[in-house]
C-alpha cells in the first residue's frame, strides 16, 4: 500500500511511486535471490534510529532511484522520510506475500 507523507510535494510523490514500482518489480523478478529480498525487508523493518545517518549504495535501490530521477547517483539516504528509499522498500514489501519472510 502506498504510504505518502502528507507534506510531500508532487515530485516527491512521483519519486516514491516510481521507486515503489521498481521495488515491486525487482522483488517479483525470478532472478532476485531470496537473500536479497530478505535484506531489503530487514531495512524496511528497521527504524531510522537503527539506520542512523547511513547512505546506502545497494545496487537495486540505487538503480531504481537513478532510473526514477534520471540522475546518476551513487547512494540513497537510509531514511524512511526519503521518498525514494521508502518507495522502494514499500514496493518490495507489498510484492512479497504476508507469509513470506515472517511478515
Image (cartoon, helix red, strand yellow):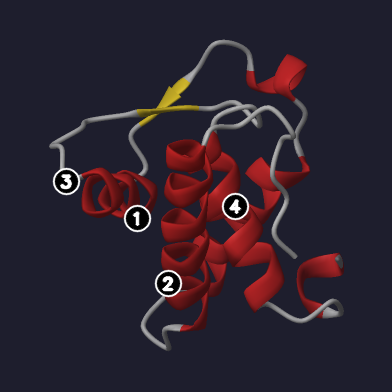
The residue singled out by tag 2 in the image is: 26
Label 2 Cα neighbours within 10 Å, binned few <14 / some 14-19 / many ≥20? many
Q: CA distance from mark 4 to mark 2?
A: 11 Å
Secondary structure of residue under mark 1: helix
Task: Please determine whether, in this image, residue 89 is positioned above or below residue 99.
Answer: above
The residue singled out by tag 1 in the image is: 60
The residue singled out by tag 4 in the image is: 89
Label 3 Cα neighbours within 10 Å, binned few <14 / some 14-19 / many ≥20? few
The numbered mark, 3 or 2, whose residue comes first in the sequence reads: 2
The quadrant in which the N terminus is found is bottom right
Q: Residue furthest front?
A: 10
- At 86% from the left and 67% from the top, the residue drawn is 102
Q: CA distance from mark 1 to mark 4?
A: 11 Å
Please state which of the two labelled residues, at mark 3 or mark 2, is closer to the viewer: 3
Secondary structure of residue under mark 3: loop
- At 31% from the left and 44% from the top, the residue drawn is 62
Amino acid at each position: 500500500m502506498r504510504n505518502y507523507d502528507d507534506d510531500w510535494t508532487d515530485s516527491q510523490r512521483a519519486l516514491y511511486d516510481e521507486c515503489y514500482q521498481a521495488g515491486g518489480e525487482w522483488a517479483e523478478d525470478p532472478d532476485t535471490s531470496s537473500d536479497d529480498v530478505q535484506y531489503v525487508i530487514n531495512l524496511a523493518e528497521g527504524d531510522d534510529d537503527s539506520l542512523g545517518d547511513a547512505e546506502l549504495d545497494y545496487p537495486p535501490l540505487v538503480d531504481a532511484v537513478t532510473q526514477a530521477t534520471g540522475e546518476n547517483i551513487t547512494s540513497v539516504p537510509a531514511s524512511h522520510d526519503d521518498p525514494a528509499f521508502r518507495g522502494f522498500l514499500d514496493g518490495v514489501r507489498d510484492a512479497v506475500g504476508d507469509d513470506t519472510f515472517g511478515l
